[in-house]
Amino acid sequence: MLHTIQSVTDYLQHLQDKGFHFKEDALGFIEFGKHYTGAEDKLVIAAIELTLKAQKEFDGAFFVSLLERLTKEKARNRSQAMRVAKELNILN
């Protein structure tokens, strides 16, 4: 299912369907980060996923910082984002 999700909105709905609810400020951070970095949805989705895995909750500042780093490292998709996260020791 996750591979068929194309938009941030669809991904957030998928997480909500699984029982994870984002607060209004979290949605603001996601929207801000997307526009601030100019990242495509698939990279924003990867950054949300990585933020949740690394922080065990959604941390808006962490998310924006991570998304900035992923765009700086020219990650374009989930696998590249995961590689960068491992290089940065964000994930074990």
Image: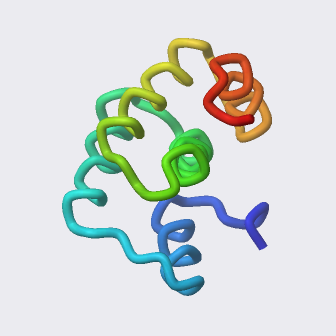
The image quadrant that residue 43 belongs to is top right
> What is the tally of numbered marks visible in this picture?
0
Foreground pick, 80 / 66: 66
Foreground pick, 1 / 56: 56
The residue under the point 54% across, 42% down is: 47
From the viewer's perspective, is residue 12 above or below residue 50? below
From the viewer's perspective, is residue 12 above or below residue 45? below
Q: Position of residue 82 (x, y in %)?
A: 73, 34
The residue under the point 57% across, 44% down is: 54
The residue under the point 79% across, 36% down is: 79
The image quadrant that residue 75 belongs to is top right
Left or right, residue 76 beside residue 57: right
Colouring scheme applied when the structure was drawn = rainbow
Foreground pick, 41 / 45: 45
The residue under the point 66% across, 23% down is: 89
Left or right, residue 50 beside residue 34: right
From the viewer's perspective, is residue 49 above or below residue 87? below
Q: Position of residue 42 (x, y in %)?
A: 61, 46
Quadrant containing the C terminus in the rendered view: top right
Left or right, residue 88 beside residue 82: left
Q: Position of residue 53 (x, y in %)?
A: 60, 51
Quadrant containing the N terminus in the rendered view: bottom right
From the viewer's perspective, is residue 11 above or below residue 46? below
Left or right, residue 56 beside residue 87: left
